[in-house]
Image: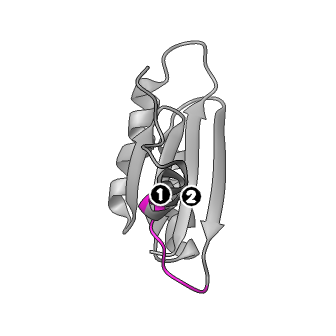
């Protein structure tokens, strides 16, 4: 996979966003993308920007609300394949330890 992105989709609301965020994550299942959700968003891996943008649009449209905020940050490696996990592994190698704390 060559395209890695961080997607954050959320309704603008004072209440819990969990149900609506779950709808956005579920929408990704219809696309040929890999994904992992974390506390700040969902990392998506795709073979093309077309597939990535289609998945991100579906996630955005899946969220109900008068106002929806979506942020998409893309790393499009055009000359080689690189998985998102390789980015973390490179940082951990530089650190000489896992890139997380015991907190």
Where is mark 2, residue-wise? 5
Location of residue 22 (image quadrant):
top left
- Crowding at dot 1, Cα within 10 Å, few <14 / some 14-19 / many 20+, comes out as many
Q: Nearer the viewer, residue 30 or 44?
A: 44
23 left or right of 60?
A: left
Residue 84 sits above or below residue 25 on the image: below
| Residue segment shown in magenta | 79-85
Spatial CA span between label 1 and label 2: 5 Å
Tag shown at residue 77: none
Residue 66 sits above or below residue 93 on the image: above
Q: Main secondary structure of the magenta part?
A: loop
Considering the numbered disc 1 on the image, is that residue within a helix, a strand or a loop?
A: strand
Task: Count numbered badges in the picture.
Answer: 2
Q: Residue at x 64, y 52 (%)?
A: 72
On-image quarter of the N terminus: bottom left
52 left or right of 1?
A: right
Where is mark 1, residue-wise? 44
Q: How is the image coloured?
A: one colour
- Crowding at dot 2, Cα within 10 Å, few <14 / some 14-19 / many 20+, comes out as many
Q: Residue at x 48, y 73 (%)?
A: 82
Q: Position of residue 7 (x, y in %)?
A: 56, 48
Mark 1 touches mark 2? (CB < 8 Å): yes
51 left or right of 32?
A: right
Q: Position of residue 10 (x, y in %)?
A: 57, 33
Q: Residue furthest bottom?
A: 79
On-image quarter of the C terminus: top left
């Amino acid at each position: 996979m060559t395209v890695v992105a961080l997607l954050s989709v959320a309704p603008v609301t004072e209440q819990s966003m969990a149900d609506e965020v779950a709808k956005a994550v579920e929408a990704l299942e219809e696309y040929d993308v890999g994904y992992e959700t974390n506390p700040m968003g969902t990392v998506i891996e795709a073979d093309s920007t077309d597939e990535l943008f289609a998945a991100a649009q579906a996630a955005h449209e899946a969220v109900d609300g008068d106002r929806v905020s979506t942020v998409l940050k893309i790393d499009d490696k055009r000359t080689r394949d690189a998985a998102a996990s390789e980015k973390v592994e490179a940082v951990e190698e530089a650190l000489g330890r896992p890139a997380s704390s015991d907190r």
